[in-house]
Image (cartoon, rainbow, N blue to C red):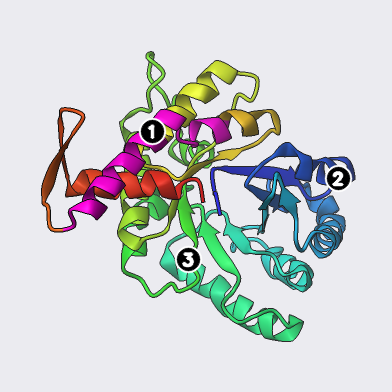
Amino acid sequence: MALRSWLFVPGDSEKKLDKAPGAGADVLIIDLEDSVVPDNKPRARDMARGWLQNHRQQVTGGKRTGRWVRINALDTPYWRDDLIAVMPGAPDGIMLPKAAGPESVQQVAAELYELEGRNGVPTGSTKILPLVSETAAAALTIPAYATASLPRLGGLTWGAEDLSAALGASRKRDAAGQWTDTFRFVRSQTLLTAHARGVVAIDTLHADFADAKGLKLAAETARADGFTGMLAIHPAQVEVINKAFSPSQAELDEAQAIVDAFAADPSAGALQIAGKMIDRPHLMLAQRILGMTQ
């Protein structure tokens, strides 16, 4: 299942929930946190549950769409009620904002174990995607996700907006549009830890949804750096992200040629293809590229 685009959908907007399946996103994240004001949270929970129950086998473009829910942070009074409300809808996963470290994921996992049993959901099937960087202390725990006991960990993602507020940073990018050192460090830690753990690495969102050129560059850079996908805050971003994270036909042809060459000579450590020396790391990358179409 492709996991290129992860689109946030406000949980209290019937209009946006109805339109969300047509956006073409690989994953829809029904948001109960930032996009929902406190007074609307009970209504959003009910709407999220109803949407999940009505879209248990959501298929877009011939592929099943992931159904996730972003609950409220553990330091709020809302998160348990969020889980209790949405688990009858058997979401594929829970996005955990403001995760303070692996212990936060373990705390949510314990709640999910009870709620899966109560709602007839297969044990362990609900994954967790923590936002790992929204405070300075949380950002320092990122490497710990690589080795902690977290069987439900579905991936890692990070955010720049909350971290910049926590730091009192007046900028996140430099004059050339590149992440400044602190945010680059957090992004790199997220990427490396996800790969070390063997889970998907999801890059942060491009906040200016009207900036298609900037989004294209950000998405292409994320894929080139090794991220699996990217968060989106507007349906218009989905197509750009999907295209950036989809290999071109030329890439697929080259990858297939490499795989075929090593299949024909499995004992070879290196081969020459089209005048280039190709070794085992190239084979691993080729296999990864071909896997992106699955």
Tag 1 residue: 251
Residue 246 magenta-drawn? Answer: yes
Residue 28 magenta-drawn? Answer: no
Q: Residue at x 79, y 52 (%)?
A: 38
Whichever of callouts 2 and 3 sits on the residue coming sooner in the sequence is 2
**Mark closer to the observer (1, 2):** 1
Q: Percent position (x, y) of residue 223?
A: 41, 36
Q: Nearer the viewer, residue 192 or 42?
A: 192
Q: Percent position (x, y) of residue 41?
A: 80, 55
The residues tagged by marks 3 and 1 sit, at their Cα atoms, a distance apart of 30 Å
Q: Are marks 1 and 2 in contact (CB under 8 Å)?
A: no
Image quadrant of residue 180? Answer: top left
The amino acid type found where label 1 is placed reads Glu
Q: Residue at x 51, y 37 (%)?
A: 165
The residues tagged by marks 2 and 3 sit, at their Cα atoms, a distance apart of 29 Å
- In the image, taking residue 30 as reference, residue 167 lies left or right, namely left
The residues tagged by marks 1 and 2 sit, at their Cα atoms, a distance apart of 36 Å
The amino acid type found where label 2 is placed reads Asp
Q: For mark 2, give the secondary structure.
A: helix
The amino acid type found where label 3 is placed reads Leu
Q: Nearer the viewer, residue 204 or 226?
A: 226
Q: Percent position (x, y) of residue 256?
A: 35, 42
Q: Are marks 2 and 3 in contact (CB under 8 Å)?
A: no
Tag shown at residue 276: none
**Mark closer to the observer (3, 1):** 1
Q: Percent position (x, y) of residue 225?
A: 34, 36
Tag 3 residue: 153
Q: Residue at x 77, y 40 (%)?
A: 22
Tag 2 residue: 18
| Numbered range of the magenta stretch | 241-266
Residue 279 at least partly seen: yes
Q: Residue at x 18, y 57 (%)?
A: 266
